[in-house]
Image: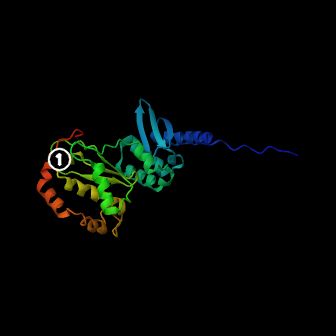
Amino acid sequence: MARQLPVAPEPNRLVKVWRRVLERRLRTRLRGKVAVEIHDNTHTMLTFQRQRALWRLRLHHMFLAAPDEVLQALASFVRTGDADASVLLDKYIERNRIFIRRLSPAQMRKRLRLSPVGRYHDLARIYERLNERYFQSRIDAAITFGPAPRVKGPRKSIKMGSYSADSKVIRIHPALDQPLVPRYFVEWIVFHEMLHHVYRARRGEDGRRCIHPPELMEHEKRFHDYQRAVAWERENLDLLLCARTEQA
């Protein structure tokens, strides 16, 4: 005798059910109407806004099954911006990072606007020559001039370069694209960021994140103009701090 087996609910229907449950759980904590939108973003995990008597929240799907303490922290953060609640939410997101969709470095780079050629320095050419000279052309990364952070008043410090391990993109501060900044100094900054591709950040014995392990700092001294570049930085830092860039 034939009997039809029960049909499993479609994934989208399950998400709708869980979303409605999540809305009810948040409604009691926010003491008001709540509308939740579930997303699968790769960076921003939660956003919210108040529209009169309605709370609108956009949450990553990891929050669908969040425990009560996390939802209570979410409500406290939404209502008052509570700092302790923010820390708890950060820890929850970190523990559940496995549920965040991963993009390949190539996919990430497609979303970026890369501008490696400046008025005075061609970062793409510098990167290519350094890669060939020091790394046998084995480093697979992209390079660009990055945007200058907006600051009020004179700069007190400057981050001349950065490296993203996720997208494998090196960003150089546009303040370095000046005629008075020598090429060897720009090369040194690019070389340093390329070393971050080789020596990844790790946790030290004290549990803190170490982005400049000793072997990186030792390797950096192999740069052909290391001493001259260090001396130029020491003597000309004000030139970089006072630079006016198009992005600034």
Q: Residue furthest right?
A: 1
**Can residue 169 be seen here?**
yes
Number of marks: 1
Q: Is residue 97 left or right of residue 122?
A: right
Quadrant in which residue 234 is drawn: bottom left
Q: Quadrant of the C terminus?
A: top left
Q: Nearer the viewer, residue 154 or 21?
A: 154
Q: Residue furthest bottom?
A: 205
Q: Residue at x 14, y 53 (%)?
A: 237
Quadrant in which residue 76 is drawn: top left
Measured as percent of width and height from the top left, residue 20 is found at 56, 39
Measured as percent of width and height from the top left, residue 147 is found at 28, 43
Q: Which residue is mark 1?
A: 155
Q: Residue at x 35, y 41 (%)?
A: 113
Q: Residue furthest top?
A: 52
**Can residue 96 be seen here?**
no
Q: Is residue 141 above or below residue 41?
A: below
Q: Nearer the viewer, residue 77 or 223?
A: 223
Q: Is residue 247 above or below residue 90?
A: above
Q: Is residue 191 left or right of residue 2?
A: left
Q: Residue at x 30, y 61 (%)?
A: 133
Measured as percent of width and height from the top left, residue 211 is found at 32, 61
Q: Nearer the viewer, residue 74 or 161?
A: 161
Numbered disc 1: secondary structure = loop
At label 1, the amino acid type is Arg
